[in-house]
Amino acid sequence: MSKREHRPAQAVERAREAAASTRQLLAAQADATLVRAAQTGDRTAFEELYRRHVQLVYARLTRLIGFSPDREDLVQQVFWSFHLALPRYRGDASVAAFLHGIVVHIAYEALRKRRRAMGTSKELELDQLVAPDATPEARARQREQLARVFVLLERLKPKKRIAFVLHVVEELPLTEVAVLTRSQPRAVGQRVAYARRELLQMLQREGGVDE
Amino acid sequence: MSKPAAELDEMTALLRGLRPELDELARARVQARLSEAIGAAAVAPAPARLRPSRVLWPIGAAALIAAAAALVVSVRAPAPAPQRAPLAVHPPVVAVSPPSALVPPGPARLELAPHALAGAAAAGLVPRLGQPSDQFELPEGAVARAAIGQHMRLSLRGPARLRALALTSDRIELALDRGELAVEYDAGKGGELVIHTPHARVRVVGTLFGVRVGGGHTSVGVAHGAVQVDAGAERHLLHADHAWRSKPGTIGALDRDMRRALQAHAESVRPPAATHGVLSVEGSRSGVTARLGAQLLGETPVWALVQVGAVEVSLTEPGGGTSIVRTQVAGLERAAGAARDSVGSRTQPVPRRAAAVNGPADRTAPPPDTAALLYARAEQCLAGGDRDCARRELEALVARFAESAEAEPALYELGQMAADCAAAVPWLERYLRQHRNGRFAAGARQRLALCHAAR
């Protein structure tokens, strides 16, 4: 294949990458535009921000606090806090990052309050989350695993749990987790390490009982 | 790797792959509560912490009571005894409903159109309405239309029985035992509206909707807005063009009969007309007999539909003392913000026009276009998958607001959205002419290069 024939394919790839990053930029810019409009009292703009981010907020909340029945109320709290914070929002962070901070704070408060009241996962809901194309056996196993992981996480202290989920599950760098949790990166690292150790001990104990 | 460590990794990966989604109803429910809270916060100090709607309603109610208090006007009358709170006479807070006496016996169709109201008022039948104990019974085929305050209009189709459980400025509670009720309700102007049926409790978010009770079950259909239906432990949020049935407890499409009834209701003549207004006599004292000339209105609190203009109301205390109150009754269709009359009463705000079923959702004047608004609209169009709509908005943006900050991404986006190079090149070239070192210049050059290569 000649060098000339290579060029369009490479250029298309580059253009695709550029388009993807442009999309992100445009999305961030559209968010900024909507925030500016919402700051002037435009409720339609706020509703649009809600529509754009609600699923992300919900997913993050679920990963942080599990299948708690009050997630819907917590989503509402997140957006209400966001609405109250709008006048102070200067666009230093993206809307998604700003919302993530609120989600973490509200999740922490919720976990702190109901730590001992174990959130039980609804089987139906878990069923909707496991891979739809898996075999019934695989689905049952995934469902069981999901229920188990949330039961284990529930035994961790809220700060450790949040640090673990943000760093290990969501793969955020320690510095970013530290910003979100208003802590020092070193403290976050320690929480993650403790959380991991405690989870391993729990699994080991469970394994021992099983065996 | 040890077994627990491998297990933990597997669990972590499973958790990472989790993509839970808030279902459409829950999303709409949260959005409705947020709108409600933001609306309440616009007229009252924002609550420190948002709770579900059961906590928000009192906030809204407090705001409404404050607004209602602001409407109470001075009364030109002999000074009441100093230790007694004065009565307020003013245009309505809560207003008119049709008494069952108006419904003729046997199959009939009753439209409380302006002329009917005028006739009824002349016959002295309309006054003394809106009492919590009121009960309306309609025979087969009869239709009664009425307005309650400025924010609710209803049509009741017989055979029907509707009972008023609570009628205050911040709460209207009705019980529909049987029959078909179509309601247009503006939650932004009124407080809570709840309709009880034998099988469900319907809480209104602000909408045009219908409730039908018959054959051992309840149907709720929505033409505009949203309604929350509580049936036992279940809760549903109904949106436009959807209906809920207590049997089998499912949500489906709005049926043809209900749609027709809602359409008829939306298109019906508004009962209050410019010739009539509502006189309200209320205050902290009850049991005061109010008369309009020789016509007995009833005991306070009382609301009556009367002809517009100056009226003289005589108030007789339970002990026998009589005082005269003069005030001006404004027509219900007069413009909002019109000048106060001679005794300081406010004229009525313009009632919201009934929108036809499936008519345009936006009933208020659209805000003036701005670059930000056009850009946001384009984003909305894109989110909905309508590229043509997005293109139109962006083209309007770059034509009308070429100097705005939004024009730069709009130009670039137009170039990217173009279906082929012939359409894309003019936008991209224009982008590069105007924003040689712009944020998207690299992307624009790449696409241009591709287009030139393709030639």
Image (cartoon, coloured by chain):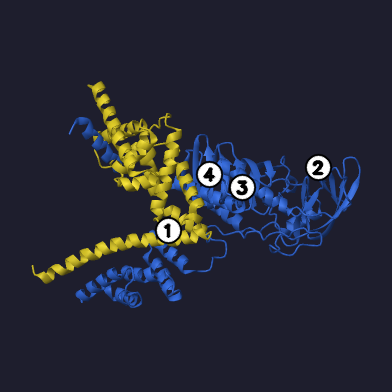
Chain label for disc 1:
A
* Quadrant hosting residue B423: bottom left
Chain label for disc 3:
B
Foreground: B237 or A210?
A210
Give the residue displayed 65% in from the left and 44% down from the top: B171
Residue topped by disc 2: B285
Rendered location of residue B325, percent (x, y): 85, 53
**Quarter of the image where the C terminus of chain B is located:** bottom left
Secondary structure, mark 1, is loop
Rendered location of residue B273, percent (x, y): 71, 60
Marks 2 and 3, the one that precedes in the sequence: 3
Residue topped by disc 4: B50
Type of amino acid under label 4: Leu
Mark-to-mark CA distance, 3 and 4: 13 Å
Against A125, residue B71 (above or below) is below
Mark-to-mark CA distance, 2 and 3: 26 Å
Q: Colour of chain A?
A: yellow
Marks 2 and 3 belong to one chain = yes
Type of amino acid under label 3: Gly
| Number of marks present in the image shown | 4
Q: Colour of chain B?
A: blue
Rendered location of residue B199, percent (x, y): 56, 36
Marks 3 and 4, the one that precedes in the sequence: 4
Mark-to-mark CA distance, 2 and 1: 55 Å
Are the two marked residues, 3 and 4, in contact with CB atoms closer than 8 angstroms?
A: no
Q: Which mark is residue B60?
A: 3
Rendered location of residue B409, percent (x, y): 37, 68
Residue topped by disc 1: A91
